[in-house]
C-alpha cells in the first residue's frame, strides 16, 4: 500500500494515512492495556476463601523420619507434608488439615517402626550372645 492511500484504493479514504480504527497505533479500548490485564485477582478469585495461615505441614518431622528412621514411611510423610501448602492455596482448607495430620501420622509411625526394629535388633543379639556363651563357643 502506498502512503497516503487514495480514495480509489480498497479500504482507503482520502487523508486516513493508514490509521487503524481508534487512532494510529491504539489498541481497541484506548491507550494502554485492554481491560483486565495487569489487575490483581480479588479474594476468593480461585475458588477459595481468604483465610489465615495454613496448618503446620510437619515437613521437618517427615524429613527427619526419612533420614533417621524409616525410609518408606518417611517418603509418604514428605509427600503428604508438601501437599499442605498447595491445598491451602487452592482453598481446600479441610484437605490441607487432613494432609498435615497424615504427614504427622506417617512420620510418627516411621519413628515407632524404627524404635521397634532397634529393640528387636538388641534383643536378637542378646539372645544370640547368650546362646553362644552357654554353648561354649
Image: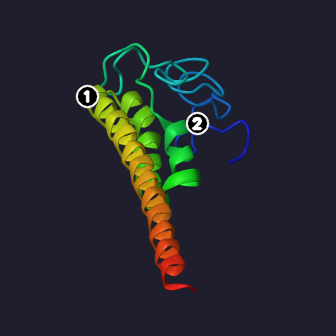
The mark found on residue 94 in the picture is: 1
- Between tags 2 and 1, which lies in front? 1
The residue shown at (43%, 36%) is: 86
Could you tell me which quadrant the C terminus lies in?
A: bottom right
Out of 9 and 48, give the one closest to the viewer.
48
Q: Residues within 10 Å of mark 1 (few under 14, many from 20)?
A: few
Out of 46 and 80, give the one closest to the viewer.
80
Quarter assignment of residue 9: top right
How many tags in the picture?
A: 2
The mark found on residue 7 in the picture is: 2
x%, y% of residue 88?
38, 28
The residue shown at (34%, 32%) is: 96
The Cα–Cα distance between marks 2 and 1, rounded to whole angstroms, is 68 Å
SS at circle 2: loop
The residue shown at (39%, 45%) is: 80
4 vs 55: above or below: below
N-terminal of the two: label 2 or label 1?
2
Q: Position of 21 compared to 73: left or right?
A: right
74 vs 28: above or below: below
x%, y% of residue 58?
47, 34
Amino acid at each position: 500500500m502506498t502512503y497516503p492511500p487514495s480514495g480509489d484504493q480498497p479500504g482507503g479514504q482520502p487523508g486516513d494515512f493508514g490509521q487503524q480504527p481508534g487512532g494510529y497505533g491504539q489498541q481497541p479500548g484506548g491507550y494502554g492495556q485492554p481491560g483486565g490485564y495487569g489487575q490483581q485477582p480479588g479474594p476468593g478469585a480461585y475458588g477459595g476463601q481468604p483465610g489465615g495461615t495454613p496448618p503446620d505441614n510437619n515437613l521437618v518431622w517427615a524429613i527427619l523420619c526419612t533420614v533417621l528412621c524409616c525410609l518408606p514411611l518417611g517418603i509418604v510423610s514428605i509427600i503428604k507434608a508438601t501437599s499442605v501448602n498447595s491445598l491451602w492455596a487452592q482453598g481446600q482448607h479441610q484437605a490441607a488439615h487432613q494432609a498435615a495430620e497424615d504427614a504427622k501420622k506417617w512420620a510418627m509411625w516411621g519413628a515407632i517402626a524404627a524404635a521397634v526394629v532397634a529393640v528387636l535388633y538388641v534383643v536378637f543379639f542378646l539372645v544370640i550372645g547368650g546362646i553362644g556363651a552357654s554353648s561354649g563357643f
